[in-house]
Image (spheres, grey):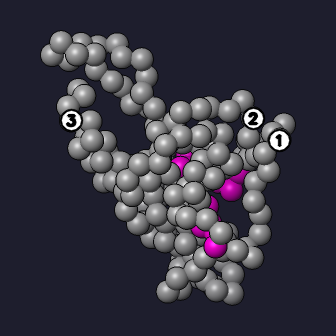
Amino acid sequence: MSDLVARTGRHQQRYEGGYRLVAGCIPYKYRNPDENCGGKMKKTVEVLMINSSSGPGLLFPKGGWENDETVEEAAEREALEEAGVRGEIKDLLGHYYFKSRTLKDEFCPDGSCKAAMFPLLVKEELCSWPEQTETQCRHSWMQDALVEGFSKWHAKNTADNC
């Protein structure tokens, strides 16, 4: 059981232009180098995805961006609450649009969401976390965030590191 508590409710939720604003991240870390790359050790990147009780498939940690935090703080909070990791937020990968099947309200009746996605370099993995009980990416927009956003960002930012 975690001593940390996940935020709940919608009273501080941000909305813009008919979209519920969401913050999320693609948590990653480097596995111990095990191959040689031109005299340097090659880094292997591992990406963390989570399960959800709302349906099958793997997801990235993400959730509502609230009024009392920056978008980066919201992404870090979601990584902690949903995946049990802390780390260093990197550059914005982009904004991704999707419709939530389950989270519709008076401000966003059709469930339209706009997600700001960031890479998060994992520095700490917790033994327990607030939403701990919660095979492929479930949503196509998350696949786009991984392939078009994170993969390109990672290639650009690690070009000199093998």
Pair 1/2: label in front = 1
Q: Residues within 10 Å of mark 2 (few under 14, many from 20)?
A: some
* Circle on res. 108: none
Query: Whole-Å distance between the Cαs marked 3 and 1?
Result: 40 Å
Asked whether residue 21 is in view, the answer is yes
In the image: residue 138, left or right of residue 45: right
Q: Amino acid at mark 2?
A: Ser
Q: Earlier in the sequence, mark 1 or mark 2?
A: 1
Residue stretch rendered in magenta on the structure? 53-67
Answer above or below: position of 94 versus 20.
above
> Are the residues flagged by discs 2 and 3 in contact, CB closer than 8 Å?
no
Q: Quadrant of residue 133?
A: top right
* Circle on res. 3: 1
Report helix, strand or loop for mark 2: loop
* Circle on res. 159: 3
Q: Earlier in the sequence, mark 2 or mark 3?
A: 2
At x 74% / y 47%, what residue is drawn?
131
Based on the picture, tell me whether residue 12 belongs to the magenta stretch. Answer: no
Report helix, strand or loop for mark 3: helix
* Circle on res. 128: 2
Q: Quadrant of the N terminus?
A: top right
Asked whether residue 57 is in view, the answer is no
Q: Position of residue 3 (x, y in %)?
A: 83, 41
Query: Whole-Å distance between the Cαs marked 2 and 3?
Result: 35 Å
Q: Residues within 10 Å of mark 1 (few under 14, many from 20)?
A: few
Q: Position of residue 4 (x, y in %)?
A: 78, 45
Residue nearer the viewer, 44 or 112: 44
Answer above or below: position of 88 versus 113.
above
Based on the picture, tell me whether residue 62 belongs to the magenta stretch. Answer: yes
Query: Whole-Å distance between the Cαs marked 1 and 2?
Result: 8 Å
Q: Position of residue 63 (x, y in %)?
A: 61, 61
At x 60% / y 76%, what residue is drawn?
14
